[in-house]
């Protein structure tokens, strides 16, 4: 009498016991010799490995990169109440520092320290506003970027949850802050022009 030996077969990544009778076995309703089973097993391993590598490289290719070089300089928006301005300078290829402020009749009513930087392949926008957020820096992560647009988001912040910069021309930049507040949706648009420094 021949003994039946239990074997392990791979079925969509789940191991199950299969019975072997002599030199043949049945997988997915198909009778196969051991050599055929070995070839099938190797094919599954190769296909799975290729799929993993494909997804791995696909995730690398979909990383979002910022290009804030066009943001360098000083930008201003004149309003009836005063002047809002932002000044940016490049520190390294992966770090830009900025200062934002609102001045009315010679008094600085609002100021913030800004930065756009890269950390572990991810770009961030950070803002430290005087007398706000208990002195803590609020960080937004880059979620969308093109040659002339950068969008940063922090859904856990009260307001804003989204900050975006739109490069219009060499002398024009639009900054938008938006999000949800207790009163509803809010969007503030700052259309700034480059300040010529003599």
Image (cartoon, helix red, strand yellow):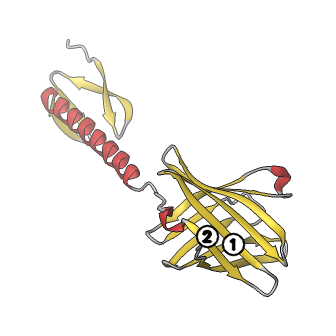
- CA gap, disc 2 and disc 1: 7 Å
Instruction: Name the side, left or right, on which 114 lies relative to 18.
Output: right
The numbered disc on residue 30 is none
Name which residue lies at 79% across and 77% down. 184
Residue 74's label in the rendered image is 2
Give x and y (percent) for residue 174.
Answer: 60, 77
**Measuring 75% from the left and 78% from the top, which residue is drawn there?**
83
Position of the C terminus, as image quadrant, is: bottom right
- 154 in relation to 56, above or below: below
**Residue 44 percent across, percent down from the top left:** 26, 38
59 or 66: nearer the viewer? 66
Q: Is residue 132 left or right of residue 92?
A: right
Q: Secondary structure at mark 2?
A: strand
| Residue 67, position as x, y percentages in the image | 47, 62
Choose between 60 and 142: the one closer to the eye. 142
**Farthest residue toward the front?**
198
In primary-sequence order, the first of circles 2 and 1 is 2
Contact (Cβ within 8 Å) of mark 2 with mark 1: yes
- Secondary structure, mark 1, is strand
Measured from the top left, where is residue 23 in percent x and y? 15, 23
| 132 in relation to 20, above or below | below
Q: Crowding near pointer 1: few (<14 within 10 Å), some, many (20+)?
A: many
Quarter where residue 141 is shown: bottom right
Q: Where residue 85 is drawn, which disc sits there?
A: 1
Dot 2 alpha-carbon crowd within 10 angstroms: few under 14, some 14 to 19, many 20 or more: some
- Relative to 25, 52 lies left or right: right
Looking at the figure, which quarter contains the N terminus?
top left
């Amino acid at each position: 009498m021949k003994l039946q030996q239990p074997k392990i077969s791979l079925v969509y990544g789940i191991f199950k016991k299969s019975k072997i009778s002599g030199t043949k076995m049945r997988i997915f309703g198909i009778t196969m010799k051991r050599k055929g089973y070995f070839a099938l097993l190797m094919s599954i391993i190769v296909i799975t490995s290729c799929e993993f590598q494909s997804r791995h490289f696909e995730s690398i290719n979909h990383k979002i990169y910022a290009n804030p070089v066009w943001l360098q300089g000083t930008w201003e928006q004149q309003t009836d109440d005063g002047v809002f301005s932002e000044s940016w300078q490049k520190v390294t290829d992966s770090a830009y520092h900025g200062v934002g402020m609102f001045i009315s009749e010679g008094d600085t009513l609002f100021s913030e320290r800004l930065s756009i930087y890269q950390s572990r392949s991810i770009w961030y926008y950070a803002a430290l506003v005087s007398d706000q957020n208990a002195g803590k820096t609020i960080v937004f992560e880059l979620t969308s970027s093109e040659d002339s647009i950068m969008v940063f988001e922090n859904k856990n912040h009260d307001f804003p949850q989204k900050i975006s910069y739109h490069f219009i021309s060499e002398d024009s930049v639009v900054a938008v802050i938006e999000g949800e507040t207790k009163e509803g949706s809010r969007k503030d648009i700052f259309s700034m022009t480059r300040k010529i420094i003599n």
